[in-house]
Image (spheres, helix red, strand yellow):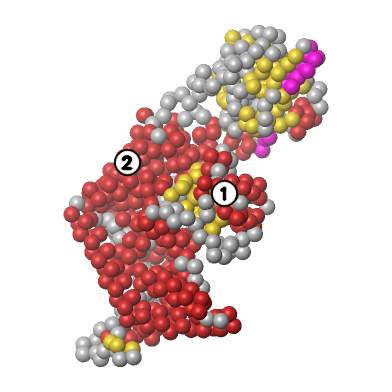
Amino acid sequence: MEYKALAQDILNRVGGKENIVSLVHCATRLRFKLKDNGKADAEGLKANPGVIMVVESGGQFQVVIGNHVHDVWLAVRQEAGLSDDSEPVAGEKAAKGSVLSQLIDIISGIFTPFIGVMAATGLLKGLLALAVTCGWLTPEQGTYKIWFAASDALFFFFPLFLGYTAGKKFGGNPFISMVIGGALTHPLMIQAFEASQAPGAAVEHFLGIPVTFINYSSSVIPIILASWVCCWLERKSNALLPSSMKNFFTPAICLAVVVPLTFLVIGPVATWLSHLLANGYQFIYAFAPWLAGAVLGAMWQVCVIFGLHWGLVPLMINNMTVLGHDSMLPIILPAVIAQVGAVLGILLATRDARQRMLAGSAFSAGLFGITEPAIYGLTLPLRRPFIFGCIAGAIGGAITAFSNSHAYSFGVPNIFFPAQMIPPGGIDATVWGGLIGTGVAFVLACVLTFFAGMPRASAAPGAVTVAPASANDILAPMSGSVIALEQVPDSTFASGLLGKGVAIIPAVGQVIAPFPGEVASLFQTKHAIGLQSDSGIELLIHVGIDTVKLDGVPFTAHVKEGDRVQAGDLLIEFDRQAILDAGYDLATPIIISNSDDYREIDTVASSAVEAGQPLLSVSH
């Protein structure tokens, strides 16, 4: 399996299978619910190159992986022997956190499983709106109707899907709560609601109690509350009934009690609460839209870091259900695109090959609404780009909110999201305002980052921490993984014909001086350099295998033959990704050419080494 080693390391560092209560994933993160967070090794996980970041928030231990999180999730489940994403050990509970942590955990657990599908249906609905606006389709056409059904089915039958995930989250049989969601959207109940709206319609009763019929399609809060009640009743029933009767009578009791209770009490109360939340949000938003946009635009990525953004997802969906639109999602779009702009600023400004590689992948992921690689890999560690992104997001959010932009379907804010901001009447000033706000955020974050977000020289001489060394020590000329010379895929180096030494698979595209001495030779193609130390050690550093064929394109030399160098001085920079894309191996032999002058040559580094730290030691 491709991610087996990563999965094993993650499983070991979260405390093993025995410490896992539940495991789900979202767009980029593995979300663990652990019995004891103290058993998890967050720092060890951060050191794994396959892990972007580790975050403890909302009662969850979150491991940020990136776009391939689903594959890693499958690998972790297989290694742990988990049959599904629920509790692997029945009856085990995680330690309770604060009320906010528990709320965030519940919300994320309910919505995470289908957030990707929900975003996809929203995108499809937005593209349909664009097609109608441009005259490519009309609502009367069969093509439109079929695609609209595909885009609207999840939202219309929301209680059905939420019933399943909520039932699972609350620890009950998810199919029972799913049936309750089905009852809420049953055609018979929708017909009863429509009939009740007619003037002079008769009041329906359940066992003599009057029923207020409500259209529960697309609703959120009623089914979540009903699922909680159902799971509570299920546990009580299972505790009282004999084991031979549980499988049949427990579901029957839950359905017979909770479905009527939902139509009589839970549904009307939850609907009232939904309208209260929506109208309360509208009241606050209407007070100063530009201020609300600035605050949300500035703080959104901060909320993402701590996982607090999940608390706003139900409010967005509730706005869609009650009001028919939402104003938060368009404000979030500039906040997301601002971080993408900051990444572009880094890409244009940096000379560091590793940063350029990270920026390239983070930029493409960010365009599709996935900002974790950008935040944890680049903007947050560099600090200023993240701050500039938040400032630009605030300005863009203020412009968007001032323009009264709204989203008419749920989705992940990305480059396609503006299609979901088109109102039923077609493109108007609200759409253009949202686009202007997003564009301003992108350009401002990019420009600020390029000119003031990071040092102009990413690899200044002396930037590497150099360990104390004797005349017989050779420091690592680059950071990376250390391998034996015999493992180099080139017989000339592997045989020791050119001398003894080791090889490093570089993690950063820089070569530094491993000792004080002189540049004895520099190949014209700049892929290899020969050095002689003050104590007489003759060293060859050959970046990659057969890279002479690249004719020097991915290499930049910072010294010339005959130059005097000190340990830690920058010698060569190279583009790792360009070498890999060209099909060449990065293994870099570090050869002592005059090996015969020494009695012993020892490798003192472990499997991984940082530039400037001890690598080899010689003795006469």
Figure quadrant of residue 618: top right
- Percent x, y of residue 343: 43, 39
Where residue 277 appears, as percent x and y from the top left, is: 27, 64
Label 2 sits on what residue type? Answer: Ala
* Residue that appears at 44% across and 46% down: 371
- In the displayed structure, 601 sits above or below 60; it is above
- Give the residue pinned by disc 1: 14
Crowding around mark 2 (Cα neighbors within 10 Å: few <14, some 14 to 19, many 20+) is many
78 sits to left or right of 377: right
Left or right: 156 in relation to 484:
left
Q: Is residue 425 above or below residue 559?
A: below
Establish if 510 lies above or below 18.
above
Quadrant housing residue 508: top right
**In this orientation, which residue lies closer to the viewer: 246 or 363?**
246
Question: Residue 392: which disc?
Answer: 2
Q: Which mark is residue 65?
A: none
On the picture, is 342 further left or further right than 570? left
2 or 1: tag closer to the N-terminus: 1
Q: CA distance from mark 2 to mark 1?
A: 37 Å
Magenta region: 583-602
Query: Which label lies toward us, 2 or 1?
Result: 1
Q: Residue at x 58, y 62 (%)?
A: 89
Tell me the element at label 1: loop
